[in-house]
């Protein structure tokens, strides 16, 4: 038996077992209807980023996803924070251009 197959001291089964939801104290989440308003993608070096502006009953948001092989990682930014996010990205770009890069070690 491997460590993640041991019984939990909290009397819950590991998340990968099919009957996990039966032991959850919370009701299962219902899917939320999301409408895609605009989508675009960009490849930077070996990474593919997908930006999707969406809307659901709670409001508009930007989902930024990084896709590689079979994995997808996402962050979600509410539309109310997009201007601040853009400003911070601009500051990071400026810093990246102004701060000298550290020298790379020999042989790399």
Image: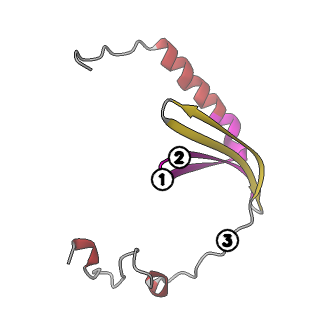
Residue 3, compared with residue 104, is above or below; it is below
| Residue 90 picture quarter | top right
Q: Which mark is residue 67?
A: 2
Magenta segment's dominant SS is: strand
Question: In the figure, is residue 74 to the left or right of 34?
Answer: left
Residue named by callout 1 = 71
Residue 20, compared with residue 86, is above or below; it is below
Alpha-carbon neighbours of circle 1 within 10 Å: few (<14), some, or many (≥20)? Answer: few
Residue name at image x 22 percent, y 18 percent: 107
Residue name at image x 70 percent, y 68 percent: 32
Alpha-carbon neighbours of circle 3 within 10 Å: few (<14), some, or many (≥20)? Answer: few
**Element type at mark 2:** strand
Alpha-carbon neighbours of circle 2 within 10 Å: few (<14), some, or many (≥20)? Answer: some
Residue 10, compared with residue 51, is above or below; it is below
Q: Nearer the viewer, mark 3 or mark 1?
A: 1
| Residue 50 picture quarter | top right
Is 12 covered by the magenta stretch?
Answer: no
**Label 2 to label 1, Cα distance in Å?**
6 Å
Question: In the figure, is residue 108 to the left or right of 70?
Answer: left
The front one of 100 and 20 is: 20
Query: How many callouts does the rendering have?
Result: 3
Residue named by callout 3 = 31
Query: Disc 2 vs disc 1: Cβ atoms closer than 8 Å?
Result: yes
What residue span does the magenta drawing correspond to? 59-85
Question: In the figure, is residue 4 to the left or right of 61?
Answer: left
Nearer-N-terminus badge (3/1): 3
Q: Which mark is residue 40?
A: none
Query: Disc 3 vs disc 1: Cβ atoms closer than 8 Å?
Result: no
Is 80 covered by the magenta stretch?
Answer: yes
Q: Nearer the viewer, mark 3 or mark 2?
A: 2
């Amino acid at each position: 038996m491997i460590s993640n197959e041991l019984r939990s001291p909290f009397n819950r089964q590991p998340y990968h077992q099919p009957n996990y939801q039966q032991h959850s104290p919370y009701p299962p989440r219902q899917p939320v209807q999301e409408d895609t308003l605009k989508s675009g993608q960009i490849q930077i070096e070996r990474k593919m980023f997908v930006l999707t502006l969406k809307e659901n009953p709670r409001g508009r948001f930007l989902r930024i996803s990084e896709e590689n092989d079979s994995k997808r990682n996402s962050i979600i930014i509410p539309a109310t924070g997009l201007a601040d996010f853009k400003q911070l990205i601009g500051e990071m770009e400026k810093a990246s251009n102004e701060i000298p890069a550290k020298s790379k070690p020999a042989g790399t």
